Every structure is written in structure tokens, then in C-alpha cells.
């Protein structure tokens, strides 16, 4: 069966690059009307142009920092003012940090939790009434760092563990209202986030990925489209009775502790 989101309004946060960009592009291919949120206006415009080229539907873009109350409020208000409804909320925006308790500080903790937990909590809170009205659904982007314990994944792993439990709690609360809530948990995935937190050159990053591949049971790291396909599946009617699920897309990495490759980034 073909997956279609014709006349559906989909909000994707963190849509200016990486996994968020891939999610936006796949929803565009499926005919969705998009609200794209990010902090980099130029990147958002570029992604929006690529989305519009799929089906001729121009996305609505919002430049906002979702770690702030103002950013969440602007995102919710502007999306509903522009479209009048919301069918799917994809909470993808997030930041990472590679540190451990012996060298960390509270700014790192606050930065990660403000975006990865508080921002998701706040934006979801603001948009739940609209999702109840549309009988829509929510897909959160988590990480296997929330379940695989590894030195160097603090406080990012803590934040993703919190997001997983948030998913289950809100799924239970909203199920009687007809709103489904699920999460996709990527493993080692090609994106810019590792380069940002390590300062790796492109060559260093590619070497790191090749080393990472050897830790994945299926022998390949994920790309953004792998994650996007699962997001779209969970958001579609194909998953109409799926809620409270945390779905790993990782080539089996969570079974072998392969994320210990991240510990190499701790100085």
C-alpha cells in the first residue's frame, strides 16, 4: 500500500540538516504540507526548496530555538496560524555532548536537557490540543544512547532515556483521545552531529564511520533516510494501532555495545 500524507500537516523540528532534513524530504514526497523548524535560516530555506521540488508544495519555515519558551511558543502559534491544524508532530531537534562525570559541568547538562527534553516537553504540551482535535500523532527522535550504557554519553544518554519514558507516558495518557505517540531510536547514523562535537575533519569523520561499521552486526551505519522511513511508517495509517513504541533502527547495534566507539572522543 502506498503511504500518502495528502492534505496532512506535518511539523518537523530540527529540519535544517541531517536526520530532520531526511524526514522532511520523505514527508514531502508523500504529499505532506510541512512546517519546518530550525535555527539556521539559510539551511531551512535550502531544505524547503528541495521539499517544494517534490510535489510543488511550499513548506512553511520557522526560525526558532526550541530550548527556549519563546521558541516553542512561536513554533506552535505560527504553525497553527498558518495551517489552522496539525496532524503529525516530529520532535527531532536535539543536541549532543560527549563528556563524563569527571570532566563535565552544569552548562553542558543544561544545554542538552533544555533542547532534548524540556523543548520536546514544552512544544508537545502546546500542540496536544490541536493533535487531539485532528486525532493526529507524535514521533519523537530518540537514540540507542538512551538504552546502551557507554562512557562518554553523559548527559545525552540521560536525556534520551528521559525522552523514551516521556514517549511511553504521553502515549498512555493520550491513547483514549485517539492520539498515538511513538519514538524512533537511531543507532550510528551519518550526520553532522559527531563532527560538531568532536571537531573532526571530513577525512577523520569518514575514518571514524568506517571503524564504527565494524561494530554494527549488520555491517552498515544508518543514513538519514533509514530513520525517515521508520518515522513516516509510524506516522501513517499503516501503524494505526502502534503507540508507546520505541523502535530501534540501528542494524542491531544495541545488542553488542558497539557505541563504545564514542568513548574515544573523551579527552
Image (spheres, rainbow, N blue to C red):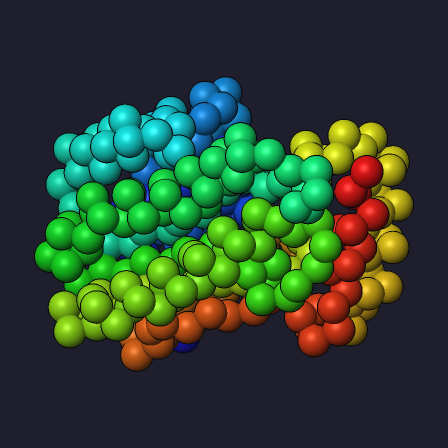
Front one among 170 and 158: 158
Front one among 174 and 236: 174
Judged from this view, the residue extending furthest toward the top is: 42
x%, y% of residue 31?
Answer: 35, 51
Left or right: where 100 falls relative to 165: right
Front one among 216 and 8: 216
Instruction: Residue 254: name its quadrant.
Output: bottom right
x%, y% of residue 184?
Answer: 49, 62
Instruction: Residue 95: name its quadrant.
Output: top right
Front one among 250 and 43: 250
Q: Is residue 243 visible?
A: yes
Judged from this view, the residue extending furthest toward the front is: 102
Instruction: Residue 257: name its quadrant.
Output: bottom right
* Residue at 38% from the left image edge and 51% from the top image edge: 90
Compared with 242, 127 (above or below) is above
Compared with 33, 141 (above or below) is below
Number of marks in the rendered image: 0
* Residue at 66% from the left image edge and 63% from the top image edge: 149
* Residue at 79% from the left image edge and 43% from the top image edge: 265
Q: Is residue 15 visible?
A: no
* Residue at 14% from the left image edge and 59% from the top image edge: 132
x%, y% of residue 202?
Answer: 81, 33
Left or right: where 259 falls relative to 147: right
Question: In the picture, which quadrant includes the N terminus?
Answer: bottom left
Amino acid at each position: 500500500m502506498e503511504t500518502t500524507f495528502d492534505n496532512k500537516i506535518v511539523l518537523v523540528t530540527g529540519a535544517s540538516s541531517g536526520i530532520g532534513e531526511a524526514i522532511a524530504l520523505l514527508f514531502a514526497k508523500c504529499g505532506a504540507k510541512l512546517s519546518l523548524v530550525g535555527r539556521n535560516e539559510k539551511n531551512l530555506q535550502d531544505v524547503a526548496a528541495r521539499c517544494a521540488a517534490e510535489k510543488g508544495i511550499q513548506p512553511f519555515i520557522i526560525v526558532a530555538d526550541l530550548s527556549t519558551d519563546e521558541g516553542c511558543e512561536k513554533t506552535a502559534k505560527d504553525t497553527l496560524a498558518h495551517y489552522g491544524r496539525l496532524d503529525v508532530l516530529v520532535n527531532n531537534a536535539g543536541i549532543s555532548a560527549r563528556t563524563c562525570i569527571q570532566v563535565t559541568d552544569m552548562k553542558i547538562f543544561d544545554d542538552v536537557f533544555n533542547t532534548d527534553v524540556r523543548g520536546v516537553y514544552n512544544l508537545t504540551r502546546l500542540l496536544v490540543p490541536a493533535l487531539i482535535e485532528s486525532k493526529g500523532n507524535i514521533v519523537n527522535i530518540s537514540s540507542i544512547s538512551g538504552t546502551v550504557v557507554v562512557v562518554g554519553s553523559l548527559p545525552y544518554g540521560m536525556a534520551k532515556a528521559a525522552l523514551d519514558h516521556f514517549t511511553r507516558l504521553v502515549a498512555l495518557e493520550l491513547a483514549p483521545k485517539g492520539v498515538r505517540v511513538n519514538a524512533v531510536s537511531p543507532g550510528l547514523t551519518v550526520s553532522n552531529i559527531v563532527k560538531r562535537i568532536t571537531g573532526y575533519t571530513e577525512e577523520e569523520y569518514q575514518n571514524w564511520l568506517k571503524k564504527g561499521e565494524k561494530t554494527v552486526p549488520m555491517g552498515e551505519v544508518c543514513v538519514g533516510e533509514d530513520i525517515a522511513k521508520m518515522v513516516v511508517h509510524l506516522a501513517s495509517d499503516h501503524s494505526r494501532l502502534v503507540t508507546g513504541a520505541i523502535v530501534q533502527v540501528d542494524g542491531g547495534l544495541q545488542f553488542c555495545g558497539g557505541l563504545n566507539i564514542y568513548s574515544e572522543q573523551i579527552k
